[in-house]
Amino acid sequence: MAFTHTWGLTFRSGGQSVSSTTETVTSSGEANISESIPDNADDYKINIAIDISTLKSIFMLASVDMELYTNADHDGAFDHHISLSAGQPLRWTVNSVEASPFADDASDVVDIRVTSSDPGTLQIWTLQDGTP
């Protein structure tokens, strides 16, 4: 079974709007989460598996400002750090011009630690090749 992420972009100015072409990304695996993050979260652990070498698409959205650290240990070491601003999505696909949010370290993600001073919701959708 194939999973599909469809992306679109609309620009509006005054009474005019311009829509770009739609991008569709398809792959055999998907891992998604929607988690409530408590008030004053400090290293709040969420289990999610992301195979960086087979990642095709990722969308992250936080309802409040959040700092994400992947594979963090108790000594403060981590593989990736992602800052999410409230309501500002992180979007990446294999066709993106910008680098993957995981480009600096090829380590697969096994968990994410969240730090946030306010309670909120974190949503993550990933599309990956389940049979690399």
Image (cartoon, rainbow, N blue to C red):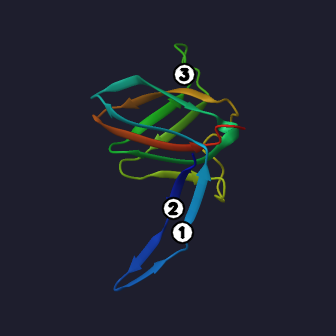
Image coords of residue 48 (percent x, y): 50, 29
Residue flagged by tag 3: what amino acid is it? Ala
Image quadrant occupied by the N terminus: top right
What residue do we see at 64% from left, 58% from top? 96
Question: Does residue 70 appear left or right of residue 131 in this picture?
Answer: left
Q: Where 44 falls versus 10 (above or below)?
A: above
Q: Which residue lies furthest to the front in this view?
A: 1
What residue do we see at 33% from left, 39% from top? 121
Numbered label attached to residue 72: 3
Assess whether mark 1 and mark 2 are in contact (beta carbons under 8 angstroms): yes
Q: What element carries label 1?
A: loop
Of the pair 43 and 56, the residue shown nearer to us: 56
Of the pair 49 and 77, the residue shown nearer to us: 49
Assess whether mark 1 and mark 3 are in contact (beta carbons under 8 angstroms): no
Q: Read off the residue under disc 2.
A: 7
Q: Distance between the residues labelled 3 and 1?
A: 36 Å
Q: Read off the residue under disc 1.
A: 22
Instruction: Name which of mark 3 and mark 1 comes first in the sequence.
Output: 1
Of the pair 127 and 112, the residue shown nearer to us: 127
What residue do we see at 51% from left, 61% from top? 7
Image quadrant occupied by the C terminus: top right
Instruction: Name which of mark 3 and mark 2 comes first in the sequence.
Output: 2
Q: Can residue 124 be seen in the rendering of this structure?
A: yes
Image coords of residue 62 (percent x, y): 38, 44
Assess whether mark 2 and mark 3 are in contact (beta carbons under 8 angstroms): no
Label 3 Cα neighbours within 10 Å, binned few <14 / some 14-19 / many ≥20: many
Residue flagged by tag 2: what amino acid is it? Trp
Label 2 Cα neighbours within 10 Å, binned few <14 / some 14-19 / many ≥20: some
Please tell me in which quadrant of the rendered image residue 34 appears: top left
